[in-house]
Amino acid sequence: MTALELTINNKNFDLGTDQAILGVQPCCLMNDEFTLPLEAATRKRIDLILTNLGWNIDEFSSNCNVFAERTKTKEQQNLLKKISGYKKPPDYVLYQHGTDKPIAIIEAKRPSQSLEKALKTGNKKLCNSIKC
């Protein structure tokens, strides 16, 4: 998986070729003349993708099922800290609609960064500690 790939519901999307499905445009500024986008740019794309796929990212809404940089409940937050020793919260925690059950974690990375560390962190520490 590259930094521009995303897996949702066991379907792989390539952010470079699946723009029509995901509602995103490729970055035209990725060459030697310009600086590379930061993680914040990746998060904007993830927000757009999740919205286009029907996820509710509005944390002020009672129907929200995507939480950024935090878990939904204090119990999950405490479990995350206690079991994993992880100090920084996940970039995104996705919940089954209408429940407090986490079903996925997304770790956003800037396009130039390797995903190996994020995959290990997300799979081993985060998902196991909050039972997603």
Image: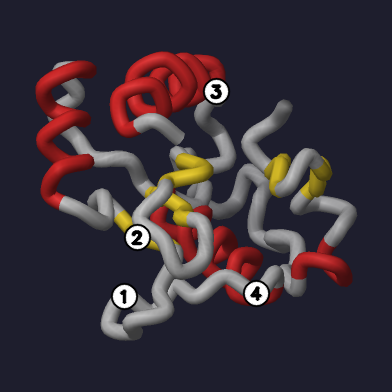
Tell which circle, 4 or 3, labels the residue nearer the N-terminal end.
Answer: 4
Colouring style: secondary structure
Front residue (pair 25, 54): 54
Q: Counting other residues with Cα less than 10 Å from the Cα at mark 4, is it few (<14), some (14-19), or many (20 or more)?
A: few
Q: Tag 3's secondary structure? A: loop
User: Could you tell me if the residues under marks 1 and 2 are in contact, i.e. CB atoms within 8 Å?
Assistant: yes
Answer yes or no: do the residues labelled 4 and 3 have beta carbons within 8 Å?
A: no
What residue did someone put label 2 on? 67
Q: CA distance from mark 1 to mark 3?
A: 29 Å
Query: In the image, residue 56 lies at what x, y percent?
Result: 50, 75
- Residue appearing at x 80%, y 48% in the figure: 13
Percent x, y for residue 84? 22, 18
Which type of secondary structure does the marked residue at label 4 adopt? loop
Residue beneath disc 4: 54
Q: Badges 2 and 3: C-beta atoms under 8 Å apart? A: no
State the separation of the CA atoms marked 4 and 1.
14 Å
Q: Nearer the viewer, residue 36 or 118?
A: 118
Nearer to the camera, 18 or 83 = 83
Residue holding disc 3: 114
Measured Cα–Cα span from mark 1 to mark 2: 7 Å
N-terminal of the two: label 1 or label 2?
Answer: 1
Q: Residues within 10 Å of mark 3 (few under 14, many from 20)?
A: few
Q: Report the side of 127 relative to 129 (left or right).
A: right
Q: Amino acid at mark 2?
A: Phe
Sooner in the amino-acid sequence: mark 4 or mark 1: 4
Q: Which mark is residue 59?
A: 1
Residue displayed at 51% across by 29% down: 113
* Residue 60 falls in image quadrant: bottom left
